[in-house]
Image (cartoon, helix red, strand yellow):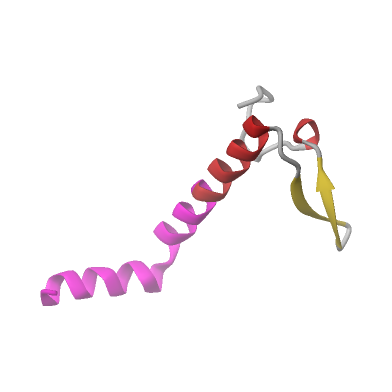
Amino acid sequence: MSRKTREEVERILLEGTLMDEAIAQATREAIRQHIRAGNPIAADVDGKVCWLAPSEVQLDGDDGKRP
């Protein structure tokens, strides 16, 4: 790996923003896939793990339309 590439990777890891965005996007997509398949989703509700039906799940930033 070149020094420039190594420095760029280090910057991305230290900054964290790109990684945070990628993880959030991957999480939203995984939830959408569960909803499309009709599978329940585990969620933290008031400190307890609960299973939510696909119809109960609302993704942040969604316009209310089902995936």
In this view of the protein, which residue sits in the foreground, 20 or 51? Answer: 51
- 31 left or right of 41? left
Q: Residue furthest left?
A: 2
Residue at image point 71% right, 33% down: 38
Q: Residue furthest top?
A: 65
The image position of residue 67, as x and y in percent, is 60, 27
Image quarter in which the N terminus is found:
bottom left
Q: Is residue 21 magenta?
A: yes
Name the quadrant containing residue 30: top right
The image position of residue 51, as x and y in percent, is 82, 48
Residue at image point 54% right, 51% down: 24
Q: Is residue 47 above or below residue 6?
A: above
The image position of residue 18, as x and y in percent, is 40, 57
Q: Is residue 9 magenta?
A: yes
Residue at image point 75% right, 42% down: 40
- 59 left or right of 46? left
Q: Is residue 39 above or below residue 47?
A: above
Q: Is residue 60 above or below residue 51?
A: above
- 17 left or right of 11? right
Question: Which portion, as a residue range, is magenta?
Answer: 1-25
- 48 left or right of 20? right
Residue at image point 49% right, 59% down: 20
Name the quadrant containing residue 28: top right
Kindly report the secondary structure that dominates the magenta region of the rendered protein: helix
Name the quadrant containing residue 49: bottom right
- Count of labels shown? 0
